[in-house]
Image: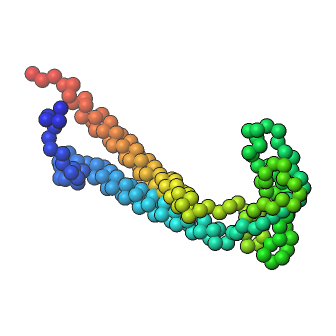
Amino acid sequence: MAAFRGPRVWLWRWRPNPLRRRSDELESWLLLATWTLTLVTGLLAGLATAHAVESSLAQQRAEWHPVLALTSKNTPATSTSAASHERVWAEVRWTAADGSPHTGQARVEPGSTAGTPVVVWTDRDGRLVTKPASASQAGLRAGMSGVLVGASAAAVPLGGGRLLRRRLERQRMEQWDAEWEKFGPQWGWKTG
């Protein structure tokens, strides 16, 4: 099948051709601009997002720290063996770096008695936070966020370009219909 085709001509849309219409040339430039904007927008948005997420998670690793807290009350023990490995919520209390007392909810082992030590993570104001992401987890999150935001941002110029190409195609078809209305009836004449 490939033997019947001619050689592939690169940049064929810009080559001189007596059949090329102005709309064909406009469409070729629109296509080039759309793909360029799509790639640049996606790349810049993805890189900016990845950098922002990475620096935010690095800041959390620097500012959040573990604190030893104590359970305030006894926690119920679970009876099933499968559920015995699951942690339960309990009220805990701890002292912040500035010496102020704090209380909050944390996951503890079932059957813990009041005063059982538990490690919790706090921010610089002494509020409970989750354990910060490790450097490798932060890299993965930043990369995934960058890819998702980059792809979403790239969809905007790509969608806009497709809409403009669809409009050009509609105008081209309207032109074609108008020309056909003008010249089509002439083909029906009989000769001789």
Left or right, 68 with respect to 2, comes to: right
Q: Quadrant of residue 5?
A: top left
Residue 27 % position (x, y): 32, 51
Query: Which residue occupies 53% across, 57% down?
Result: 140
Closer to the camera in the image, 89 or 192: 89
The figure's colour scheme reads rainbow
Left or right, 190 with respect to 130, comes to: left
Residue 182 % position (x, y): 27, 36
How many marks can you see?
0
Q: Compared with residue 174, is residue 164 higher up or lower down, i.e. above or below?
A: below
Q: Quadrant of the N terminus?
A: top left
Residue 13 % position (x, y): 24, 50
Query: Which residue occupies 77% across, 54% down?
Result: 107
Q: Compared with residue 42, is residue 56 higher up or lower down, i.e. above or below?
A: below
* Extreme residue toward the left, this view: 192
Query: Which residue occupies 74% across, 45% down?
Result: 85
Residue 74 % position (x, y): 89, 53
Q: Is residue 30 visible?
A: no
